[in-house]
Amino acid sequence: MDAFAKKYVESFMNELIAKNPGESEFHQAVSEVLTSVAPYLEAYPYLLENKIMERMVEPERVIMFRVPWMDDSGEIHINRGFRVQMNSALGPYKGGIRFHASVNLSIMKFLAFEQTFKNSLTTLPMGGAKGGSDFNPRGKSDAEVMRFCQSFMTELFRHIGQDTDVPAGDIGVGGREIGFLFGQYKRLRDEFTGTLTGKGLAWGGSLLRPEATGYGACYFAQEMLATRGESFEGKTVVVSGAGNVAQHAAEKAMRLGAKVVTLSDSDGFIYDPDGFTEEKIAYVKNLKNALRGRIKEYVNQYPSASYTGGGAKPWSIKCDIAMPCATQNELNGDAARTLVANGCFCVTEGANMPSTPEAIEVFQSAKILYSPGKASNAGGVATSGLEMTQNSIRQKWTAEEVDSHLHRIMSDIHAACIKYGTEEDGYINYVKGANIAGFIKVANAMVDQGLV
Ligand code: NDP
Ligand code: 2IT
């Protein structure tokens, strides 16, 4: 970065932090994008004059609301609901809903900001948003989750619509929650439209949407590996998380010939040195999705595997490829150094912002393959976009059709990263590539649409 870009980033970040105090995840996400695009802004002064970056970090709208609900014993609880409608330059707002105790405005804003560039990268017409609540679904009955979802939607419904804002799942929001949210939306609006994605297959959902984020991450990793004449075949893969993204990343990596040896949750991780099989993955899916169990139960079923508790993460396990698929900042500088020292040469993010800035620095200094979530986990929202298309034309595509679109989109995103991220020595800086490619489209659309 030259002196101008350095100074621009520094003064921009100072202002952002002063204006949005305490929002550390949001600061982190903006800082990463800004560092990539600052030299580009310098080369195209009309973007500076139009104050595009200043406009991008100010959400178009933030909705924050009370979500009261009653548990099974009759006790009343009050949670906080959010929807951050960040940017609609490319299409209706689009992005997931997260139910997790940690949810706050900073996390919502970082996710909505990332979503804007990710959605741009998919090539589909979608703006960026994110929503959620500090509601913790862990240990809640189906009836409690339903009442919570109904209360949440009773406020949210007035702010969304198939041409306005189309929410979907994220942490703590899967098929069950989308069903309850959709049911209440339909009841309040008296319309059956594709206003949420990730719907059930019988009522407007797309084949492969549940699989799409994890599968897409593996398709992206395949493209990365191919730049070095490598593939998943025979590689050892470490995956974190045990939810939607982790399950399907592990499944696809295994089917592509890799030995996948770990999964985790916030309590700890399991290590299966023999690697997962179809049967073991089916066991995990049932354990997590139907029984809503904890990952440590895996070792009761498969005693040759071990469990490490105390919130331990799987990054100490020797591997060739790492796929963080749980949550933000789950992989720090020390973990990154351990991975690199153990010979890991490819890190493909399934989660949003799982690597800390220090970890990214470690990967890039070691010149290993490293892709940020906004590029490699874009298959989920891309397939949501495909669900919207199928809803609009009132048709249903086959799994093969959806999969071929997903494949093409992931390979186009990879090509965009190469175009904008290849450095002088030939190293592909996927962070720079994804940020610049995602940014350009949104920025130019904003200029075209005037000062709004
Ligand atoms: P799920 O709720 O299905 O699974 C989340 C997994 O991550 C669980 O195993 C959970 O463990 C673990 N986890 C969550 N929070 C923490 C934490 N603070 N520390 C350690 N582990 C944690 O969510 P998804 O699989 O859908 O989402 C995972 C990641 O992928 C998120 O970053 C999400 O934003 C991102 N993503 C999701 C997409 C989707 O389509 N679903 C699309 C693109 C990105 P525990 O049960 O202990 O909480
Ligand atoms: O982070 C994400 O991209 C998602 N949670 C999916 C969003 C979507 O609209 O499918």
Image (cartoon, rainbow, N blue to C red):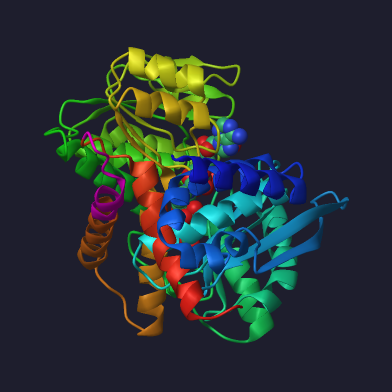
Q: Residue 138 location, x and y as percent?
A: 66, 41
* Closer to us: 193 or 14: 14
Q: Is residue 420 magenta?
A: yes
Near-viewer residue (51 or 104): 51
Q: Is residue 418 above or below residue 183?
A: above
Residue reaching furthest right? 75
Q: Main secondary structure of the magenta part?
A: helix
Name the quarter where the C terminus is drawn: bottom right
Residue 373 occupies which quadrant of the picture?
top left
The answer to whether 335 is drawn above or below residue 170 in the figure is above
The magenta-colored residue range is 415-425
Observer-nearest of 145 and 193: 193
Q: Give the image quarter of residue 222.
A: top left
Q: Residue at x 34, y 67 (%)?
A: 123
Picture quadrant where residue 305 is located? top left
Q: Is residue 317 left or right of residue 87?
A: left
Q: Position of residue 26 (x, y in %)?
A: 63, 46
Residue 133: x %, y % from top left: 70, 53
Residue at left offset 59%, top offset 58%: 177
Where does the N terminus fall, quadrant-wise?
A: top left
Q: How many marks?
A: 0
Q: Residue at x 54, y 38 (%)?
A: 327
230 with respect to 213 (left or right): left
The residue at the far left in this view is: 229
Residue 266 pos. (x, y %)? 58, 29
Q: Residue at x 40, y 67 (%)?
A: 441
Magenta stretch encompasses residue 174? no
Q: In this orientation, does residue 118 appear?
A: no
Residue 418, can we see it? yes
Q: Is residue 313 left or right of residue 304?
A: right
Q: Is residue 310 above or below residue 389?
A: above
